């Protein structure tokens, strides 16, 4: 709940030592457009960015291992996201109500892995890239 419902927050750079973003950390920060995640980040909690309707782009670090349930729910401006090969778990509704989402970019030769850990309703967005 660190920045829960902080409507005036538009951008933020998180500290380089941060390893996890807790549940509901940025819930309903509907003015948040830009966020820099540290390369040390390993987990994003449940509903961490839920309701961040202005968040249009985000770079997930290669250290990320888990994305919680509904972590990006309602991020209606999010068009695409690159998922790192380090991911081991993704919550079932991680991208629920992301009405503009068209692409989840994944490293080449990882499609089978992502189809195992990603709910089937999101498989249509998977796009392998080099």
Image (tube, grey):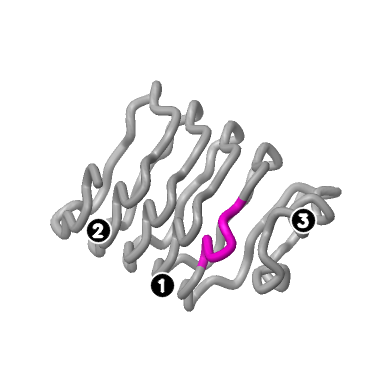
- First in residue order: circle 2 vs circle 3: 2
Q: Which residues are magenta?
A: 90-95
Residue lying farthest bottom? 99
Q: Which residue is mark 3?
A: 116
Residue lying farthest left? 8
Compared to residue 118, the image places residue 58 above or below, namely above
Picture residue at 71% right of the left edge, 64% below the top: 126
Q: Which disc is residue 29 wearing?
A: 2
Where is residue 42 drawn, in percent x and y? 52, 33
Instruction: Say if the magenta span includes residue 92.
Output: yes
Determine the main secondary structure of the stretch shown in magenta. loop
The CA distance from mark 2 to mark 3 is 31 Å
Q: Residues within 10 Å of mark 3 (few under 14, many from 20)?
A: few
Q: Secondary structure at mark 1?
A: loop
Instruction: Say if the magenta span includes residue 96.
Output: no
Q: Residues within 10 Å of mark 2 (few under 14, many from 20)?
A: many
Q: Which residue is mark 1?
A: 76
- First in residue order: circle 3 vs circle 1: 1
Picture residue at 39% right of the left edge, 21% below the top: 17
Picture residue at 79% right of the left edge, 50% below the top: 113
Where is residue 127 drawn, in percent x and y? 73, 62
Q: Residues within 10 Å of mark 1 (few under 14, many from 20)?
A: many
Instruction: Work out whether residue 69 or residue 34 is closer to the camera in this orientation and state it.
Output: 69
- First in residue order: circle 2 vs circle 1: 2
């Amino acid at each position: 709940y660190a920045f829960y419902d902080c409507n005036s927050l538009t951008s933020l750079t998180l500290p380089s030592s941060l390893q996890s973003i807790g549940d509901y950390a940025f819930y309903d920060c509907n003015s948040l457009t830009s966020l820099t995640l540290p390369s040390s980040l390993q987990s994003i909690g449940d509903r961490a960015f839920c309701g961040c309707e202005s968040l249009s782009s985000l770079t997930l670090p290669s250290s990320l291992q888990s994305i919680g349930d509904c972590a990006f729910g309602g991020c209606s401006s999010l068009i695409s996201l690159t998922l790192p090969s380090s991911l081991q778990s993704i919550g079932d509704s991680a991208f629920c109500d992301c009405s503009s989402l068209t692409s989840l970019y994944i490293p080449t030769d990882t499609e089978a892995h992502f189809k195992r850990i990603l709910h089937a309703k999101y498989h249509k967005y998977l796009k392998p890239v080099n």
